[in-house]
Image (cartoon, helix red, strand yellow):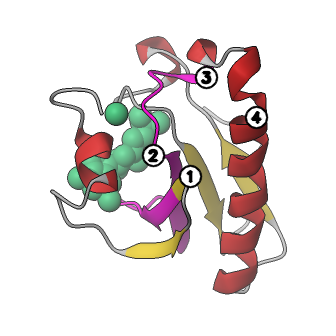
């Protein structure tokens, strides 16, 4: 747990979230400001600042986030979806606890902004 980290607090149950999936390593919950009909965030319970902080020892955990994202999409009833990691403020990262966005339920544009 990292002090003053919003998503660590959500993972610890100190701040409420609309959870859609949980296991021993991860938690998924609905984004508070959804950008698509389905917009969930998958986080590891372990604090990592960003994708760039993933080291060799975290590879299994990083892969698990993708598997959980697929499970969330199935639960939400969507086959077509976008998974997004933002790394760094310039790329749109605003919460510095790694999270995988699961976006779907509408057509997606490419390239993203
Ligand atoms: P980022 O921009 O860092 O990739 O994504 C952070 C996401 O977290 C944003 O989509 C934002 O809406 C969401 N978010 C920020 N604060 C909260 C919160 O307190 N609860 C939930 N559920 N989502 C949040
Ligand atoms: Zn954290």
Identify the image quadrant of the C terminus. top right
- Image point (45%, 46%), residue name: 45
| Disc 3: CA contacts within 10 A as few (<14), some (14-19) or many (>=20) | some
Percent x, y of residue 109: 74, 49
Residue visible at 49% across and 59% down? Answer: 27
Sequence-wise first label, 1 or 4: 1
CB within 8 Å, label 3 to label 2: no
Q: Position of residue 79 (x, y in %)?
A: 84, 75
Q: CA distance from mark 1 to mark 2?
A: 6 Å
Residue of label 3: 51
C-alpha separation, residue under disc 1 versus residue under disc 4:
32 Å
Tell me, yes or no, whether the highlighted magenta stretch contains residue 14: no
Q: Residues within 10 Å of mark 4 (few under 14, many from 20)?
A: few
Report the residue marked by disc 1: 25
Q: Vertically, is 53 above or below 97?
A: above
Q: Is residue 108 visible?
A: no
Q: Tell me the residue that label 4 is attached to.
A: 111
- The CA distance from mark 2 to mark 4 is 31 Å
Vertical side of 38 occupied by 103: above or below: above
Mark toward the viewer: 2 or 4: 2
| First along the sequence among labels 3 and 2 | 2
Task: For ligand 2, tell me if the residue under mark 1 lies within 8 Å.
Answer: no
List the residue tagged with mark 2. 45
Horizontal relation, residue 63 to residue 51: left or right = right
Locate residue 28, reporting x and y percent: 50, 62
Which residue lies most toward the right here?
79
């Amino acid at each position: 747990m990292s002090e003053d980290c919003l998503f660590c607090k959500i993972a610890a149950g100190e701040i409420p979230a609309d959870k859609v999936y949980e296991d021993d390593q991860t938690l998924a919950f609905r984004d508070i400001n959804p950008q698509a009909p389905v917009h969930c965030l998958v986080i590891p319970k372990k604090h990592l600042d960003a994708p760039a902080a993933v080291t060799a020892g975290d590879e299994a955990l990083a892969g698990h986030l993708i598997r959980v994202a697929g499970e969330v999409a199935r639960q939400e009833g969507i086959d077509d979806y976008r998974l997004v990691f933002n790394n760094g403020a310039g790329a749109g990262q605003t919460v510095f606890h790694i999270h995988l966005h699961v976006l779907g339920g509408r057509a997606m544009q490419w390239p993203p902004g």
